[in-house]
Amino acid sequence: MTNLFAADLEGALDHIRAAPRDVGTVEMIVRRPSPGAREVVETAELDTTVGLVGDSWSTRERVDADAQLNIMNSRMAMLLAPDEMGIALAGDQLYLDLDFTDDNLPAGSQLRIGDVAVIEVTPKPHTGCAKFAQRFGADTTRFVNTGEGKRLHLRGICAKVITPGTIRRGDAVTKL
C-alpha cells in the first residue's frame, strides 16, 4: 500500500476541499463478509438492523449502532491506493464524493442515497486504527487524525441506516 507523506497529502487538500456540498456520488461500495475480506459490489441493500446487507458489522462481538456504516471521502481514498481492492482495505463500506466537514455534515445530518435509502451521520468519531496505519502508514494516519485532516474528516465519518433501500455505484447522495 501507499505510504503517503504529509507533503503529498497537503498538496491534495484543495482537490478534497472541492468535493460537492449538497449532492455527491456513491463512488464505491464494499462489503466486509468476514475480518480482512472485502467484496467491491455495484449494488447493495441498506437495512436498519444489519446495516449493509452481507457485511459483517452486525455479527461482530462489539456492535456499535453509531458505527453501523463507515464512510470515507472517495477523493481521499483514491490517494491511498492505485486500485479498488487497495482502497477497500481502508475498511469502509461506502466511498462518497461529498464534503464531510462538520460545517456541511454535522452529526444528525441525513443523506438520501439513490431514490429511497436514508442514512444519518452519527457523532461517533471515525479515526485511523492500527490496521489503517499498518496498511497506509503512520504518517497518513497521523495526518487524517489531526489538524486539517481531522477537520475535513479525511478518515471518514460514521453513520446509521434510517430508511432501508437499494443503493448503487453512481447513485446521487443528497443532503437532506
Image (spheres, rainbow, N blue to C red):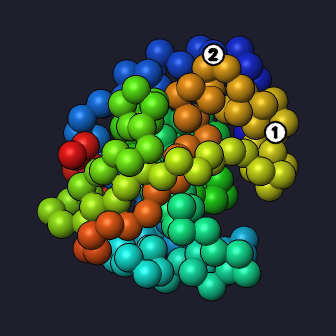
Answer with the quarter of the image where residue 49 lies. Answer: bottom left
Report whether 115 appears left or right of 75: left
Report whether 164 appears left or right of 146: left
The residue at 44%/44% (across/down) is: 107
Q: Residues within 10 Å of mark 1 (few under 14, many from 20)?
A: some
Answer with the quarter of the image where residue 131 lies. Answer: bottom right
Cβ atoms under marks 1 and 2 closer than 8 Å: no
Disc 1 residue type (three-letter): Gly
Q: CA distance from mark 1 to mark 2?
A: 16 Å
**Residue 162 versus residue 95: which sits nearer the camera?**
162
The residue at 44%/21% (across/down) is: 17
The mark found on residue 10 in the picture is: 2
In this picture, is 106 found above or below 55? Answer: above
**Residue 62 versus residue 77: which sits nearer the camera?**
62
* Local SS, label 2: helix
Spot occupied by residue 139 in the image (x, y as percentages of width and height): 81, 30
Report whether 19 appears left or right of 130: left
* Local SS, label 1: loop
For mark 1, what is the residue? Answer: 137
In this picture, is 101 found above or below 133? Answer: above
Disc 2 residue type (three-letter): Glu
The answer to whether residue 94 of the structure is visible from this angle is yes
**Residue 18 versus residue 129: which sits nearer the camera?**
129
The answer to whether residue 83 of the structure is visible from this angle is no
The mark found on residue 68 in the picture is: none
The residue at 53%/28% (across/down) is: 152
In this picture, is 52 found above or below 19? Answer: below
The residue at 45%/30% (across/down) is: 101
